[in-house]
Image: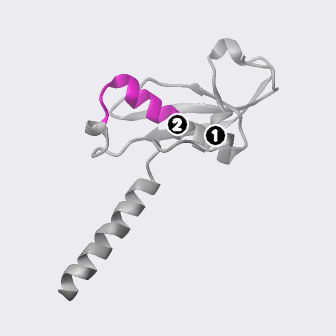
Amino acid sequence: MEYAMYLSRFIMLLLVLILSGCSWLWPSVKESDVRLITADGLTGCTRLGTTHVSLMDKLEPLLQNEAQLAEELVALARNSAVQFGGNAIMALTGIREGTQSFAIYSCETDAGS
């Protein structure tokens, strides 16, 4: 009986930790302000750095299609941009084995729109 109680608590804790690390949870207001731009939208932007984002191998099969995978990778890149103080990202590579690279930019508010 005591073993079952500890096991159930462990499973609950594990679920909380797993779900807290998923990007498919709604982004905060700051992250939703980070724009995905193309090379045409770089006017007035300063490059801050690069981020390489990846979904865990075990999470990738849960995604329905390539578009959903791309959406999750963009969400992760937006999270990274907030940490860098950026407000825009641009894809540098295509998706390869669940991984993609993005440049992070700080753009004037009307640049890249």
Q: CA distance from mark 1 to mark 2?
A: 8 Å
Q: Position of residue 13 (x, y in %)?
A: 37, 69
Quadrant of the image for the N terminus?
bottom left
The label number, if any, that marks residue 31 in the structure image: 1
Amino acid type at circle 2 is: Ala
Residue that lies at the very extreme toward the left in this rendered image: 1
Assign the C terminus to one quadrant of the image.
top right
Name the foreground residue: 112 vs 105.
112
Q: Is residue 34 left or right of residue 97?
A: right
N-term mark: 1 or 2? 1
Identify which residue is drawn at 56% across, 31% down.
102
Q: Residue 90 at what x, y percent from top left?
A: 60, 25
Displayed quadrant of residue 105: top right
Categorize mark 1 by other alpha carbons within 10 Å: few (<14), some (14-19), many (20+).
many
- Per the image, the residue denoted by label 2 is 75
Indicate the secondary structure of the residue bearing disc 1.
Answer: helix
Indicate which disc residue 96 carries: none
Residue 66: x %, y % from top left: 35, 24
Residue appearing at x 53%, y 25% in the figure = 92
Toward the viewer: 33 or 92?
Answer: 33
Check the image and name the residue furthest to the top.
40
Q: Say whether residue 64 is left or right of residue 108.
A: left
Q: Residue at x 63, y 21 (%)?
A: 37
Residue at x 65% of width, y 38% of height: 49
The reply to whether the magenta stretch includes residue 55 is: no
Which amino acid type corresponds to the residue marked 1 in the rendered image? Glu
Residue 16 vs 110, above or below: the answer is below
Q: Which range of residues does the magenta coloring cover?
A: 63-74
